[in-house]
Amino acid sequence: MRQVTGPVSKQAWSPDKLRQQFPILQREVGGRPLHYLDNAATTFSPRCVQDAVAHYENHSRSNVQRGMHQLGIEATDAFEAARGSVARYLNAASCDEVIFTSGTTFGVNLAAHCLGQSLQSGDEIVVSQAEHHSNFVPWQQLCQHYGVRMRLIPVLANGSLDLSGLDQVITERCRVVAVSQISNVTGSITDLQTITRQARRHGALVFVDGAQAAPHGPLDVQALDADFYAFSGHKCYGPTGIGALWIRSPVLASLPPFLTGGGMIERVDIQGTRYASGYRRFEAGTPPVAQAIGLGAALDWLMTLPWRGIRAHEQALSRQLLAGLSQVGGLTLLGEAAAQDRAPIFSFDIEACHSHDICQILDGYGVALRGGHHCAQPLMQALGLVATSRASIAVFNTDADIAALLCGLHDAVETLR
Ligand code: PMP
């Protein structure tokens, strides 16, 4: 079993130095500087990530885990080194617990599919009402398919989870609890400790959707006491089409495969197939090698950032944004009111202004926001909303981005009312 090791030296950091590492930040939109605040959807890659992908493509491109030649060996080494980077970033106990996926959605589907076969009638699965559809629909489908009851952790008026009745929702019938660590709509941080404690009391497994938490600094899945942790590379400064699913070793060993085919077998006979052990059982077919190498580079890069300074910077921007939003008449902000109690993801509804109109007007200012239901319609239904506008901050954002957003927003509201 390969262990997770490796020293990390921190890079000297300033917002300007950091911005220089992102080629795309040089571009303009409609003749104006780009103010990209849609990072919760997808963020940009620094040059070192692009270089790592280009190096594989131009130097070692070949298949992995089967090459008998120099290029195949180099590609496999780089691919497995990337798995090591994921394991280090998550503080997994071993690289063997890390499965490359195409992203969070794939990770949820893998877990739901593999767990389904062990469900029995009378079992229950618990998700929250604030989940992204990716961490909602696969469980809902599973419940419908196996005749199992899906129960919901409700939300408060601001969209944060209401854990006051948790012992009524997670009971002895519960087999799996699936929740996000940070909401992609409200920026609320889930109290995972309380949820895992209640799940453990009844022997339920815990699946954590880390899509919005993983971009905000190295994690410790062992301390979380969860069983599954899924995230996406493209929200973590890595390529699209890649992500990872961590599964605690004993749980991983107990699961049947998801997809079958080449690469996931120990032996195939005409009579039947013996599956490979560890993560290999879940990686059928040729994996997205270049993307995995890019993800490894992105996480290595994230581990060089001085997170104390970055968080202080993100909080200063959050305070600036919150102060500005509080000046907009008829604006309702979802999530916690104070910058230090939340992640830098801000959804708001403005009376008499549709979010699509707001986003379109702001695009004319070079400001990229997200508008809509954010793939969280059950949450929107609970809050009596159809859509919100959302600004989400990344490590390269500056006060100029927030100022541009607030300036554009005032003009948008004046135009739309
Ligand atoms: N969960 C959450 C909380 C998300 O924010 C997202 C992406 N918006 C997903 C799951 C799905 O991620 P992906 O599309 O990369 O699979």
Image (tube, helix red, strand yellow):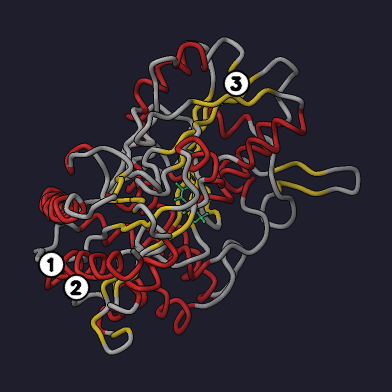
Residue 69 at what x, y percent from top left? 56, 74
Task: State the mark number for residue 19.
Answer: 2
Residue 364 at what x, y percent from top left? 33, 79
Q: Can residue 117 be seen from the camera position used here?
A: yes
Distance CA(mark 1)–CA(mark 3): 45 Å
Closer to the camera in the image, 92 or 147: 147
Mark 3 — residue? 175
Residue 355 at what x, y percent from top left? 41, 60
Closer to the camera in the image, 349 or 57: 349
Q: Secondary structure at mark 2?
A: helix
Mark 1 — residue? 15
Say which amino acid is labelled 3.
Answer: Arg
Say which amino acid is labelled 2.
Answer: Arg
Q: Residues within 10 Å of mark 1 (few under 14, many from 20)?
A: few
Query: Could you say which quadrant of the image residue 414 lies in?
Result: bottom left
State how many labels appear: 3
Say which amino acid is labelled 1.
Answer: Pro
Q: Residues within 10 Å of mark 3 (few under 14, many from 20)?
A: many
Residue at left offset 23%, top offset 82%: 33
Q: Secondary structure at mark 1?
A: helix
Residue at left offset 54%, top offset 45%: 377
Mark earlier in primary sequence (2, 3): 2
Q: Residues within 10 Å of mark 2 (few under 14, many from 20)?
A: some
Distance CA(mark 2)–CA(mark 3): 45 Å
